[in-house]
Each structure stands twice: as C-alpha cells, then as structure tokens.
Image (cartoon, grey):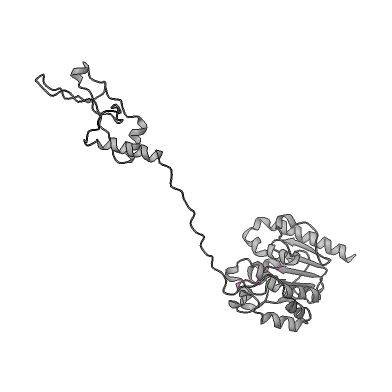
C-alpha cells in the first residue's frame, strides 16, 4: 500500500489550495480486505485487464540509473516538491528602507551662544528688555506667535516662578499662566500664602508659544536664555521654582528628570532652585497634585531658612 501523506504535508497542501488530496489505494480484491473506514473501492471484473499500476507516491523512488519518463506528474506531487525546494532555498537578504528625511524648520538656529547679543541684553533695563522680547526674531517661534509674553508680577519679588512657555490663551493676552493652568497656579500659591503680583514674579523659559503647545526645543530654549537670565538679574529673587522639565533645564542648563530632582535643593548662581510639576501637567494628572503640594511646602521651608 502506498505511504500516506503526513498530516503536516496535508496541512501545507491545504494552505496552497491543493487539498483534499486523494490517495490511490491497492484494490481491495488483491489485498483481500478493505481498509477500515475507507470508501468502497471499485473492483474490476476478473476479465483480462492491463496490469495494475503501482501506487502513486509523492517521492520518486526509482533507481538513479532508470531513465526518467516524460510524463505529467500529479499536481499535488509538484506542489510538494516546489515547497520542499523553497524550504531549502536561502532567504533573500532584506535591506532596510532608506531613512526618510525629516521635516525641518525653515530657519536653522545655532545652539552656540552669541556673545554680542548676550552682552547687549545683559545691559537692558526693564522697559528695554520687554520691548526687545516683543520684537525678538532669534528663533522660529516668532513666525507663528501673536505676541511675545515677557513676564508678570512683582519686579522685586523674593519668589520667581519659571514655566515652560506660553499657551494659546497666553499668546492671545500677552500674560503668562492664564486659563485653567493659571487658575490652578493661583490656587497653589494661595495655599502657601502667596498671590500673583505680590512678592511673586512669573516668567517662562521661552517667550513665544511653541506650535500646538509642544515642548520647546533646545535651540529655542538657548535663544531665550539671555532674556531669562536678565530677568533673574533684575528681580534678584531669593528662590527660583521651576515648573516642569523644560523650565528646570533652562534654569540648571542641563538635562533634568522631574522625579529625580524633586525634593532637592538645587542651585543656579547661588540661588536655590526647587523643581516641581507644571500646572498643565497636574490638570492632566491630578493624582500628582499631592506631590506638587509637597514641593511647595519644601520651597516654603527653604524660603524660611533663607530669611533667618
């Protein structure tokens, strides 16, 4: 009896659309009994007939010296042979697609310092500084702004809060921290006995709104850093509070992780720096408001120590 196809080959042939596979069986008359569960085979009459053909096999078992007959092979045998050859053939090497060029801003801003510009800004008074900020075109953020947002509050404050950058409402009104994030900040200040404009000055690391409120890029932070440094020099605060990671990076001039920086007394030019979450982040993640409250209490303790 011809060998049966393995279940694996049956599955392969079915996947290739060549199943079911019909097997040729030896005649039940010659075998003496029928296979159990098999369909009834047709029994030829005992009259003269051509000799029976050998059972069909999927593997060519003829001797190597036997001449190959030019006869058509069954479809499923050809499919199995093609499949076996495909398994033995080496896989074609895959080459990664070429990198796609990323869209870049229309204006390239160098990250290195501009000593002449820094020296000019460092000599400005308050009115000249705010006028210079409003007319600034040192980075691409000026291209979409409605107006620059210098800062607001007490210009001789002991507390100076630095945020990330203006949002949509700040861009409209020209004042930092308005809208929902601003109201939350006012509540945070009131919780430790402070108020906007009273012993508090509020500014941002960048003075123009980034498109779609995205995080400011490094060159944008660098372009605005002379303005922030001049504001700190004019205010002369006793304590700096960084609201969010970009503000902390602008104040400390290095990469900062909020989770690692919280609860630590950092410094910038001898001024203590406390890092906490941005109010906009707290609106999206109210479960972290308790951590922000801990940071404000820590800042209040540092201020109390500085007053002694």
Asked whether residue 226 is in view, the answer is yes
Observer-nearest of 184 and 285: 285
- The image position of residue 79, as x and y in percent, is 30, 38
Task: Please tell me whether the stretch drawn in magenta is mainly helix, strand or loop.
Answer: loop
Q: Residue furthest left?
A: 47
Q: Quadrant of residue 14?
A: top left
Q: Quadrant of the N terminus?
A: top left
Toward the viewer: 18 or 271? 18
Pick out the residue farthest to the top.
32
The image position of residue 101, as x and y in percent, is 52, 65
Q: State the residue at coordinates (70%, 68%).
A: 163
Quarter in which the C terminus is drawn? bottom right
Quadrant of residue 175 within the rendered picture: bottom right
Q: Answer with left or right where residue 38 lies relative to residue 251.
A: left
Report x, y in % for residue 173.
64, 78
Q: Is 50 placed left or right of 120 in the picture?
A: left
Determine the residue positioned at 40% across, 41% down.
89
Q: Which residues are magenta?
A: 163-167
Q: Is residue 215 left or right of residue 19?
A: right
Q: Nearer the viewer, residue 297 or 145?
A: 145
Q: With 185 as the anchor, is 84 left or right in this view?
A: left
> Relative to 43, does residue 240 appear above or below in the rendering?
below
Residue 250: x and y, percent?
72, 67
- Residue 129, magenta (yes or no): no
Would you say residue 165 sits in the magenta stretch?
yes
């Amino acid at each position: 009896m011809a060998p049966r196809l393995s279940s694996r080959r049956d599955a392969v042939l079915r996947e290739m659309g060549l199943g079911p596979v019909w097997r040729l069986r030896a005649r039940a008359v010659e075998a003496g009994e029928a296979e159990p569960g098999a369909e009834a085979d047709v029994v030829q009459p005992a009259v003269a007939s051509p000799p029976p053909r050998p059972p069909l096999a999927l593997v060519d078992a003829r001797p190597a010296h036997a001449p190959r007959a030019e006869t058509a092979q069954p479809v499923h045998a050809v499919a199995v042979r093609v499949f076996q050859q495909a398994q033995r053939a080496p896989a074609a090497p895959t080459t990664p697609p070429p990198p796609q060029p990323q869209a870049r801003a229309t204006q390239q801003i160098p990250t290195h310092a501009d000593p002449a510009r820094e020296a000019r800004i460092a000599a400005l008074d308050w009115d000249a500084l705010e006028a210079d900020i409003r007319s600034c075109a040192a980075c691409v953020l000026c291209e979409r702004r409605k107006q620059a947002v210098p800062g607001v509050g007490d210009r001789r404050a002991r507390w100076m809060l630095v945020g990330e950058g203006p949002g949509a409402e700040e861009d409209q009104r020209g004042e930092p921290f308005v809208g929902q994030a601003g109201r939350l900040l006012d509540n945070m200040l009131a919780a430790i006995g402070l108020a906007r404009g009273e012993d508090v000055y509020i500014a941002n690391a960048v003075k123009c709104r980034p498109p779609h409120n995205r995080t400011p890029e490094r060159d944008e932070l660098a372009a605005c850093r002379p303005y922030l440094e001049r504001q700190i020099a004019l205010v002369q605060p006793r304590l700096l509070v960084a609201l969010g990671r970009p503000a902390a990076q602008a104040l400390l001039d290095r990469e900062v992780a909020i989770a690692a920086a919280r609860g630590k007394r950092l410094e910038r030019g001898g001024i203590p720096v406390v890092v906490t979450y941005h109010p906009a982040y707290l609106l999206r993640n109210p479960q972290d408001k308790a951590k922000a409250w801990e940071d404000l209490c820590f800042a209040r303790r540092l201020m109390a120590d500085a007053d002694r």
